Amino acid sequence: MNNVFELRNVYKSFNDFHLEDISLHLPRGYILGLLGPNGAGKSTTIKLLLNLLEPDSGEIQVLGSSYAHSETLIKQKIGYVGENQNFYQDLTIDWTVNFISRFYRTWNQEKLNDMLTNFGLKRQKQLKDLSKGQKVLFNISLALAHEPELLILDEPTSGLDPIARKEIMDILLDMLQDENKAILFSSHITEDVEQIADYVAIIIKGRLALFDTKEAILDGFRKVSIPKSTGKTLGSTLIANTQTLSEYKGMHSQPASLEEILISLVKEANR
């Protein structure tokens, strides 16, 4: 399978935090949702993928190469949108587009123009006058204008209303009409990840708690209710791995959401 990136046993240490033994990959044509609580290591993982940090050990390959050999070529083929983009707020959309476009060989001005029109973004408007949703749409437009093979999004929908979030989800799904491309989507909003992701990775306290297809993860856990008549001292409801359900006699179960699975794993890690 042709992977757009691979992390193999990646380790990164800081004074008060360690990202330990992270192994992830993403095939072309798919979306990976990256979940975890604040401080879990999601942004550190993304910085390692972007070569903004270097791993202490392990291997990172992006687009079939390493940053040591092909950093400029790799970054020409990556689009990135963070929660906060540090553009000059007193300058216009038009000025910012003209500035950013100089750095990319594959810049598609016609595509950028179409996106600005579709999103109702006026070229002479200053960035400081855009709403939060408009800023995100503008940032995604810039990230997509050079036709990246890998799009990396770090909390892009945080604080947006459901309509703006839906619009962004549609943009991401439309990008994957080209099966040569792939998306890494980090978010606190598990509902968004559950809606569009093909693969899901959950990082907790610097460790990879889960990594699999979304379907396999959702199939692997159940929300279990234990009737009082069984005499069990467990809480009335818990999230259980399906491999252990035979231990619970007389129980009732139903599907668990990604949010419920995440909360359960965090609670387990904190015990």
Image (cartoon, rainbow, N blue to C red):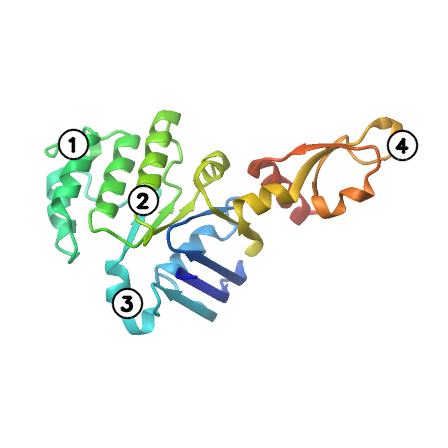
Q: Residues within 10 Å of mark 4 (few under 14, many from 20)?
A: few
Frontmost of labels 3 and 1 is 1
Q: Residues within 10 Å of mark 3 (few under 14, many from 20)?
A: some
Lower sequence index among marks 4 and 1: 1
Q: Residue furthest bottom?
A: 69
Q: For residue 231, which numbered disc appears in the image? A: 4
Lower sequence index among marks 3 and 1: 3
Secondary structure beneath disc 1?
helix
* Residue pointed to by mark 2: 177
User: 105 above or below 228?
Assistant: below
User: 32 above or below 124?
Assistant: below
Q: Quadrant of residue 208?
A: bottom right
Lower sequence index among marks 3 and 4: 3
Q: CA distance from mark 3 to mark 2?
A: 27 Å
Lower sequence index among marks 2 and 1: 1
The kind of residue tagged 3 is Glu
* Residue pointed to by mark 1: 117
Secondary structure beneath disc 3?
helix
Q: Residues within 10 Å of mark 1 (few under 14, many from 20)?
A: few
Q: Residue at x 38, y 36 (%)?
A: 157
Q: For residue 142, which numbered disc appears in the image? A: none
Lower sequence index among marks 4 and 2: 2
Lower sequence index among marks 3 and 2: 3
Q: Residues within 10 Å of mark 2 (few under 14, many from 20)?
A: few
Q: Residue at x 43, y 51 (%)?
A: 43
Residue 212 drawn at (x, y percent) = 55, 52
Q: Is residue 230 visible?
A: yes
Q: For residue 71, which numbered disc appears in the image? A: 3
Secondary structure beneath disc 4?
loop
The kind of residue tagged 2 is Gln
Q: CA distance from mark 2 to mark 1?
A: 21 Å
Left or right, 234 with respect to 260, comes to right
